[in-house]
Amino acid sequence: MAMSWFGRKPAPDRAVGDRIRAWAATACGGDPETRFSVNEIICRDPSCPGTETVILVMAPGVRTRALKIALPMVAVTEQDVQQAVMDSA
């Protein structure tokens, strides 16, 4: 993937984030009050997988959960999201 002028990767396509957000909503039970944030991060720690997708699950009255998938956003599948939800339970 190409780098921008400032050494950052270009932001993933918005449609990719929307798709992951929809999969997370379904996997978490579909509560319309729950909000999701999907981000791709590059972890510089040697123990990290490098690029990973982080989904924040923000339900009213419940502590925010972070679902981590050791893949870039464009490579995440619905099964990856389902597995991350099961692993966080």
Image (cartoon, helix red, strand yellow):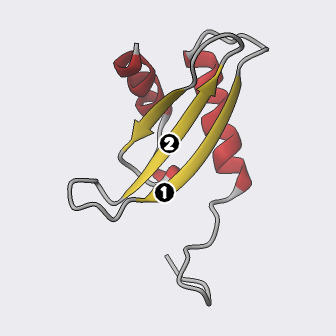
Residue 62 sits in quarter:
top right
Q: Nearer the viewer, residue 25 or 75?
A: 25
Amino acid found under the numbered disc labelled 2: Val
Dot 2 corresponds to which residue?
54
Secondary structure under the numbered disc 2 in the rendered image: strand
Q: Quadrant of residue 86?
A: top left
**Which image quarter is the C terminus in?**
top left
* Left or right: residue 64 compared with residue 53: right
Contact? badges 2 and 1 (CB < 8 Å): yes
**Percent coordinates x, y for residue 2 in the rendering:** 53, 82
Give me the disc on residue 63: none
Residue type beneath disc 1: Ile
Rendered residue at 46%/32% (across/down): 67
From the top left corner, tell me how far across and down residue 53 is, in percent: 48, 47
As drawn, is 87 to the left or to the right of 33? left
What is the spatial separation of the Cα atoms under label 2 and label 1, in whole angstroms?
7 Å
Residue at 55% across, 17% down: 27
Q: Which mark is residue 41?
A: 1
Depicted 88 relative to depicted 48: above or below: above
At label 1, counting other C-alpha atoms closer than 10 Å, the crowd grade (few under 14, some 14-19, many 20 or more) is some
Point out the residue furthest to the bottom here.
5
Dot 2 alpha-carbon crowd within 10 angstroms: few under 14, some 14 to 19, many 20 or more = many
Tell me which label, 2 or 1, sits earlier in the chain.
Answer: 1
Give residue 72's position: percent from left, percent from top. 45, 54
